Amino acid sequence: MKSKVRDIELLAPARNADIAIEAIKHGADAVYLGPSSFGARAMAGNSTADIARVADFAHQFGARVYATVNTIVYDHELPQVEALIGDLYRAGVDALIVQDMGILRLDLPPIALHASTQCDLRTPAKARFLESLGFSQLVMARELTLQEISDIHAAVKVPLEAFVHGALCVSYSGRCQASQCLKGRSANRGECAQVCRLAYDLEDAAGHKLVQGKHLLSLRDFNAQPELSQMLASGVSSLKIEGRLKDMSYVKNVVAYYRQELDKIINVHPDQYRRSSAGTSSYTFTPDVSRSFNRSFTSYFLQERRPANGHTMASIDTPKSMGQPLGKIIHAHGKQLRIATQVPLHNGDGISYLDARGEYCGVRVNRVEGHDIYLKDAVAVPRGAMAYRTLDKALDDVLAKPSAERRIAVDARLWWTGGKLCLELSDERGNRVVHSVPLPSLDAANSPQGERQQAVLSKLGNTIYSLNHCTVLPGKFIPSSLLTRLRRETVALLDRAHKATLSRPVRRPEDRDAQCYTTILTYADNVANHLAAQLYRDHGVTQIEPALEVKQPERDVPVMHTRYCLRRELGACRRDPKAARQLPDPLYLHSGTTRLRVECDCQHCEMRLFLG
């Protein structure tokens, strides 16, 4: 039976150790980052020593560190992966995020395993199977509705993880072979070439251009903030921010924003939710996700499995950041602009807009004088065009400096007994220590001492603690030097007590009798080594086709499988009798030498792309 009060985790991305530590400072309950290899982001690897540094910092707050070992693994690489996981365990990693089922058959330390989003979890049956394999957290597909999340939650006992913010892959994760087939770079190996962000012409069978030069597969960024309460109610326990390639400013701002939004919900419903780590963050800025990189926002499929025409999900004009909406351009002449906006602009800001041809343009602000904006370069800006701020100089300047502190609340109690001055410290993590120093006698004070004693005990600036409640001896004189010594030694004991009581989650046992949700696996199930194949056979699978990276199928197979649909995006859904336009069948996407055939599965409201 599920616990009535659920631990809620804000999970943040980190390209490197420094960003991971800042994510924790800004309010993350957990961070995920890639090791030196096999981390599904070839450009975001970290040494074991750096990951250990992150773990040491995070564990002070009861926050967790997850390592992404979530590529598919070839047979000759299995010993290397096994050794890497041992190193990560010794470094203090709390769990591994994995895709390749062969990892479950390695000789592993007792480390917890999370099923990666590349596992393409969309159904209760698959969730039950992954739970039976011993996964202790399941990352669900980004495309799920709130109802689908709720159905999966009802089917399993382990926590569910879902994305709440950041870039969206147009394809179901783990089911995109376009980069491998077109560029020889496997997305399942951390080398995605992002062919979905290219500009395409949409053509009919005769080559007639129906849409020209648009980024038809480039989705907007995900923003689930309006649905956070509903996501929690549907059963999500871990809320994940995408962005292991993002810079530090982005991570600081987005993490702080979602920390504040989640805390509002948790504080209103303490009988249902509690935060999974300790400490309170304070900021030198006001978090606002619209001021960081974004392609404009979508809530994707959270509310509807089959959104109606007009529910725009793509950023077809540009794959670049649109940034913060400012307002319409009401005057443009040479290097001078006026924008109908209440947003204060600053020297050095970046502004973007679409020109008369609908092409994305960007320009730097040289100076701002009242309502007049003077640009670095003269540009031809169409009057009435919407302006966006893509570079926020003021915010970037703040975020380039230390911008958050995270503190553990501590209660202190001071007393004197038997020739000893005693101090008890208890913290919000549940730790309690008592320490004493010799003080043979305690003299009465000539003046009240309470404020001075409390001031000495509150000097915790070089620690992670902040004084919450304090009981002192206001009528007694205690030398400040002695009180300082007692405070320092007791704080050191509190640190040691927390380390002594730290525990990490362990791997759940595998149910060897559990049957897989299917008996037939195709290339899209990404079985790339003999151990993965053996695991599936152990659980009732009888037919296994190797991963496309291992062996190219001899038949025509889709290189992308999506819930996103071009017809619906362009107002031409076949299921909508009031569709604004009609498009022929078949359709093709053409970019340079790349040609993709579009097939819409209207029964299931999905789309598949094939080569040629």
Image (cartoon, helix red, strand yellow):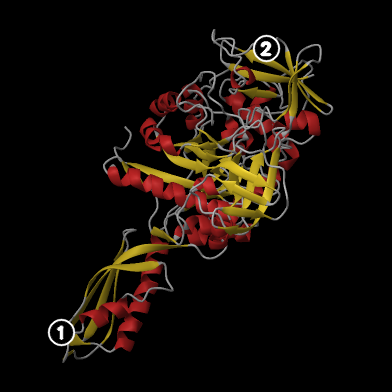
> Which image quadrant: the N terminus?
top left
Q: Is residue 80 above or below residue 496?
A: above
Contact, mark 2 vs mark 1 (Cβ under 8 Å): no
Residue identified by numbered label 2:
583
Relative side of 65 to 367, left or right: left
Helix, strand or loop for disc 1: loop
Relative side of 162 to 591, left or right: left
The answer to which of 570 and 96 lies nearer the viewer is 570
Q: Position of residue 208 (x, y in %)?
A: 79, 15
10 Å crowding of disc 1: few (<14), some (14-19), many (20+):
some
Q: Which residue is the extreme one toward the right? A: 593
Q: Give the quarter of the image for residue 586.
A: top right
Q: Is residue 465 above or below residue 472?
A: above
Of the image marks 2 and 1, the number of the one nearer the N terminus: 1
Distance in Å between CA atoms under marks 2 and 1: 86 Å
Closer to the eye: label 2 or 1? 2
Q: Which mark is residue 475?
A: 1
Q: Which mark is residue 250?
A: none
Identify residue type, mark 1: Gly
10 Å crowding of disc 2: few (<14), some (14-19), many (20+):
some
Identify residue type, mark 2: Leu
The answer to which of 284 and 552 lies nearer the viewer is 284
Q: Position of residue 53 (x, y in %)?
A: 56, 62
Q: Residue at x 42, y 54 (%)?
A: 503
Q: Position of residue 71 (x, y in %)?
A: 66, 39
